[in-house]
Amino acid sequence: MGTTSTDSDGAAARLRYIQNFVHDHPVTGPAGHSYIPSESRPTAVHSPTPYRLTVLDHISASVDEIAEHTYAANPDAGPVPSQPAAVYDWCHQNTEHAPEADRERLEAIEYRQYLEHAIRAGDDSVVCRHRCPTCRTWGLMWQQHLQRAVCTNSRCHDRAGAASKFTLARLAFEHVATRKNLRQARAT
Ligand SMILES: [Zn+2]
């Protein structure tokens, strides 16, 4: 069901990508390497590898989140795999028979992480592949400083009159709901 790590563009593939990047680009300078060129970083830093640590923190937080929800759905799940990208397959295998609500929650978390990994790697075009949850048009743009997808339809705004904005979690929720509806439509 849903996104699996065998997808060439799934959460596991994206996680492997940022993990390999950190691995293949050992830090040589005091400021570390520049992983996302557009992201501003301080030039003088106290920690030798701030950005690298941020990516590693991101990877371990992602794995921890999947593990936590997998164990909540199936307390008998075995140990978390040592390879971070393998956590998604491990989760699928251990939640196959979990209640549908648990599997849907995990599907949405995995998809949100897929979006997060892609944005970490500088590919925010993943956001544009979603319709705006409010007006259903295709004009979503990622705003890094807001950490939100913003709708560019001038007629689409919130109660205060500002452009509609959505978290990645909201986009993931909508995506999983749409996918579920498609599955149900095919089954009938
Ligand atoms: Zn909109």
Image (cartoon, rainbow, N blue to C red):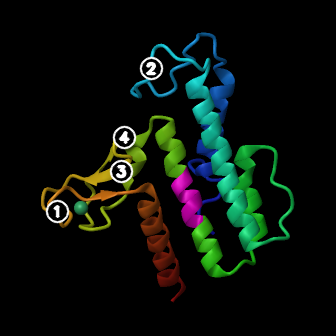
Count neighbours of disc 4 (C-alpha within 10 A) and say few if under 14, some if 14 to 19, many if 20 or more: few
Amino acid on which disc 1 is placed: Ala
Q: Does the magenta stretch include residue 167?
A: no
Q: Residue 42 carries which label?
A: 2
Q: Nearer the viewer, mark 3 or mark 2?
A: 2
Q: Is residue 109 magenta?
A: yes
Q: Which amino acid does label 3 sit on?
A: Arg
Question: How many residues crowd around disc 3 within 10 Å: few (fewer than 14), some, or many (20 or more)?
Answer: many
Which residue position holds label 3?
148
In the picture shown, does residue 92 fall above or below 145? below
Q: How far apart are marks 2 and 4 (CA)?
A: 17 Å
Q: Do the residues labelled 2 and 4 touch (CB within 8 Å)?
A: no
Extreme-bottom residue of the structure: 188
User: What percent of the width, then of the height, locates residue 45?
Assistant: 52, 17
Residue at the spot of label 1: 160
Is 129 on the left or on the right of 111, as rendered?
left
* Earlier-in-chain disc, 1 versus 3: 3
- Answer with the quadrant where ligand 1 appears in the image: bottom left
